[in-house]
Each structure stands twice: as C-alpha cells, then as structure tokens.
Image (cartoon, grey):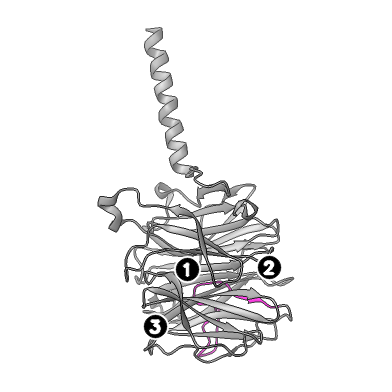
C-alpha cells in the first residue's frame, strides 16, 4: 500500500510538472532564449480569438496589447491590454472598441504601442468594417498602461502605425510606418515634428502592381539612413531605403527573404545589428509556421539564427499559426517578442542578443 501511494505521488508530480512546462512554454531551444511564456492561459481567455499583438516598455513596465473577440472582423472585436507587474502578466482588460455614438459597433484592428521619450505611452489602433475602410485612432496613458485617455481620431488620410511600432528619430521627430489597402496595397510613412500633435504623410512608396506591400517595419542605420522591410503579396519581403531621415525613399525592391503574405517585425539593436522576426516561407496566405529570428549587420544580408516556433505535427501543419510578431529591445538590452499563438493566446519570448552570434 505504501509503495502504491508512492507510485501515485510520483505520477502526480510528473503530471503536474508536464502541465507547468506546457503552460509556461518553457522549452529553450537556443542559448539566447531567456524566457518563454503565455501572457494568458487559453483556459482563462476573455475572448475566443486574439491576433496582432504589440509590446512596449514604459518606464520599466512591459505592456502588451492585441485585438480580441469571437473572430477577426467581427463587431465584438476590441483592443485588449495586459501589463507585466512583479514578473506576472495582469488579467487582460479591454481598453478600446469600435462602439459608435449611435450605438452601432465596428471591429477594432491592429493595436500598436509606442513610447516616446519622456512622454505618455501611446496606443494606436484602427476601427472599421475592414482594412479598406478603417480609420485610425489613439489613446494615451500617463501611468504606463494602467489607465487610458478617451480615444482621439486621427485626421482623414492619417492612419498611425499600421502594425509595427513608430520610431523616435535623433532629431525628436516621430516616424510612423503605415500602409493602406483601399486602392491596392500601398506603403507610406507619416511624420510628426511636434510630438504627435500633427502628422504629414510621405505619400506612397510603392507601385502596387509591382509590389502589393503593407505593414512596414523601420530599421535605423548611421548617417540619417533608414530602411523599411514590408510584407507583400509577392512571396518575398520587400525593402526601401531613405538617406535623408525618412523624407524621401528609394524604389521598393525585393530582398532575398521569403514571405507568405504574413506580418513581420524588426528592430535595430543597441549594438547596431538588426533583428527580424518572420515566417520564412513563401506560400501566399499560408505557412505561418515556422516563426524564425534572423540577424543582420547591415540590413542587406540576413542569417536565420533560430526558430521560435516549429511545425509540431506535419499532418496538422496547416492548422498551426504563429504569426504577426512584434519586437522591441528594452533598456536593459534584452529583446522582447510577442506573437499570435494559434490565435488562441499571445506568447512572449525574451532573448539575450549577446548570445546570438
């Protein structure tokens, strides 16, 4: 009897340890991976689906946001936020939605967090029936994402960062990477020289007949040189370069990086290298797995260094989706990545870039 109880005890411990390992997503497949976790457990989800997560650091506090509801494009989809306090992600709360003054409601889309230096945290998002008809809004937080202002609608023709974070340039200007879908997929950038009070657009940077491109991500190079990397319909990531701090841009061309018409994100690291998170496949509207990290010293030649997510079962690979990454580097130099995990929850991964060759 004592032996049987011991066996049952060991079995219970094994089950619990497996459960913890599964819930906290603690597998470490690369030396640079410091932490893998879900922002919330699927069993505790406030919505049946989520997508398009974003992350920012605000005065040492990690804040993440995403849109969630029954399903993308449904009217009940709103903007949700969670903050990481004392090492724990707080229960997500809805901070914005598409309810109109007349009581009607539209779906919300693509939140993007942006923390300017010495200014409140900003959360941009879109509202509208679809990406061809949506409009841009933003809210701000004076207390690192704990509470938020009333929504402010952006002027017509200004959309805010469409998926990936804005950047604050050395001269203090804000540069917002954006795109539109109402007249072909077209990329543009929006600049504010008065700390977000007003914005001006560069105009379109691509011919949609050559590249159907959206959702640019900005990389910063020396000597007022900027680079954008874009999602496209052309099975490849495209790029454009600016040599005057984003006022004018070169003709958009293809990179050597594949893209399955899925969102990407990239960041310039403190040591000058560039880090990209993307799905390295080229099947249009599919293959949002694996999700990989690539590194470049110049933004031109990229080396894949790890897979954050791989196909778990070849027979069900079409049902897996690890997509729409958002990546930042915190003040302590650690890199934070969030992304959609099968649209059921948001996964958070922490990388030590010094351990990435």
Comes first in the chain, label 1 or label 3:
3
Residue 253 at x, y = what percent? 47, 82
Q: Residues within 10 Å of mark 2 (few under 14, many from 20)?
A: some
Q: Is residue 186 magenta?
A: no
Residue 212: which numbered mark, if any?
3
Comes first in the chain, label 2 or label 1:
2
Give the left or right position of residue 114, taking residue 93 as reference. Answer: right
**Range covered by the magenta-colored residues:** 151-169
Q: Nearer the viewer, mark 2 or mark 1?
A: 1
Question: How many labels were placed on the picture?
Answer: 3
Q: Is residue 216 above or below residue 317?
A: below
Give the SS element for disc 2.
loop
The reply to whether residue 150 is in sight is no
Q: CA distance from mark 2 to mark 1?
A: 29 Å
Q: Is residue 161 magenta?
A: yes
Which residue is labeled 2 in the image? 142
Which residue is labeled 1 in the image? 264
Give the SS element for disc 3.
loop
Give the SS element for disc 1.
loop
Q: Residues within 10 Å of mark 1 (few under 14, many from 20)?
A: many
Q: CA distance from mark 2 to mark 3?
A: 38 Å
Residue 225 at x, y = what percent? 65, 80
Residue depicted at x 40% and y 84% = 211
Q: CA distance from mark 1 to mark 3?
A: 15 Å
């Amino acid at each position: 009897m004592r032996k049987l109880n011991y066996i049952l005890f060991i079995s219970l411990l094994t089950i619990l340890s497996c459960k913890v390992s599964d819930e906290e997503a603690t597998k470490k497949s690369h030396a640079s991976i410091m932490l893998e976790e879900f922002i919330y457990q699927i069993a505790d989800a406030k919505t049946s689906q989520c997508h398009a997560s974003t992350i920012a650091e605000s005065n040492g506090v990690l804040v993440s946001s995403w849109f969630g509801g029954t399903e993308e494009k449904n009217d009940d989809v709103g903007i949700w936020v969670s903050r990481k306090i004392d090492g724990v992600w707080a229960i997500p709360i809805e901070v914005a939605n598409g309810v109109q003054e007349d009581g009607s409601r539209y779906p919300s889309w693509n939140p993007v967090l942006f923390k300017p230096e010495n200014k409140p945290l900003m959360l941009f998002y879109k509202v509208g029936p679809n990406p061809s008809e949506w409009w841009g809004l933003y809210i701000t937080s004076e207390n690192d994402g704990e509470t938020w202002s009333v929504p402010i609608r952006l002027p017509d023709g200004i959309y805010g960062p469409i998926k990936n974070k804005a950047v604050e340039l050395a001269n203090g200007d804000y540069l917002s990477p954006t795109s539109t879908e109402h007249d072909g997929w077209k990329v543009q950038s929006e600049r504010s020289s008065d700390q977000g009070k007003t914005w001006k657009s560069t105009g379109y940077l691509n011919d949609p007949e050559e590249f159907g491109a959206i959702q640019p991500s900005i990389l910063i190079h020396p000597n007022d040189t900027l680079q954008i990397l874009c999602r496209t319909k052309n099975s490849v990531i495209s790029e454009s370069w600016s040599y005057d701090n984003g006022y004018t841009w070169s003709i958009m061309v293809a990179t050597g990086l594949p893209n399955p018409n899925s969102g990407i994100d990239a960041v310039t690291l403190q040591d000058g290298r560039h880090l990209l998170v993307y799905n390295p496949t080229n099947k249009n509207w599919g293959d949002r797995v694996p999700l990989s990290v690539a590194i470049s010293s110049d933004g031109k030649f990229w080396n894949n260094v790890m897979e954050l997510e791989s196909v778990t079962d070849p027979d069900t690979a079409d049902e897996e989706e690890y997509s729409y990454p958002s990546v930042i580097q915190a003040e302590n130099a650690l890199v934070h990545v969030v992304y959609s995990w099968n649209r059921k929850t948001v996964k958070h991964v922490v990388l030590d870039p010094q351990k990435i060759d």
